[in-house]
Amino acid sequence: QVQLVESGGGLVQPGGSLRLSCAASRITFSRYNMGWYRQAPGKQRELVAGISSSGSSNYVDSVKGRFTISRDNAKNTVYLQMNSLKPEDTAVYYCNARADFASWNYWGQGTQITVYS
């Protein structure tokens, strides 16, 4: 059974930093496009950052220059470094794995990030 296990969420003050990790198992990690999504209360889930199987990345405009997505194929892990956090970054963050060769798509269980004053 495929598993995506997120870690690194928590409470942080505005301007602070956090790093999320997502460890994948039972997939050929290097053949998957990986992404971090978030969902705030009352809002739709949105793509925050994505990194393709070839290593190219993209970001939603609101996090450009503050967040960095990276991947370590040897560790089957994708990361999201979040700097200069703002209260509007508060949400549940989800890891996503999407195969680049099939319509397979997997989600992690989510991790809460709360940015509070």
Image (cartoon, rainbow, N blue to C red):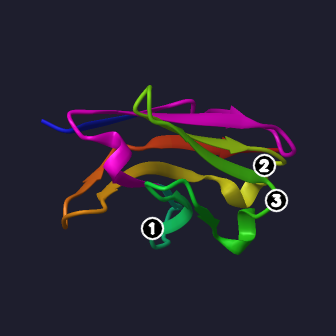
Q: Which residue is mark 1?
A: 45
Q: Which residue is mark 2?
A: 85
Q: Disc 1 on helix, strand or loop?
A: loop
Q: How far across and how far down the image is residue 102, in percent?
A: 19, 64
Task: Tell me if 114 is positioned left or right of 66 in this view.
Answer: left
Q: Disc 3 on helix, strand or loop?
A: loop
Q: Residue at x 43, y 50 (%)?
A: 94
Q: Residues within 10 Å of mark 3 (few under 14, many from 20)?
A: few
Residue furthest top in the image: 75
Q: How far across and how far down the image is residue 55, in percent?
A: 54, 53
Q: Residue at x 40, y 32 (%)?
A: 76
Give the residue type at disc 1. Answer: Arg
Q: Quadrant of residue 29?
A: top left
Foreground residue among 89 and 56: 56
Give the residue type at disc 3. Answer: Gly
Quadrant (top left, top right, bottom left, bottom right) of the C terminus: top right
Give the residue type at disc 2. Answer: Leu
Q: How far across and how far down the image is residue 26, in percent?
A: 20, 33
Q: Residue at x 31, y 62 (%)?
A: 100
- Report the number of numbered marks: 3
Q: Which mark is residue 55?
A: none
Q: Which residue is mark 3?
A: 65
Q: Earlier in the sequence, mark 3 or mark 1?
A: 1
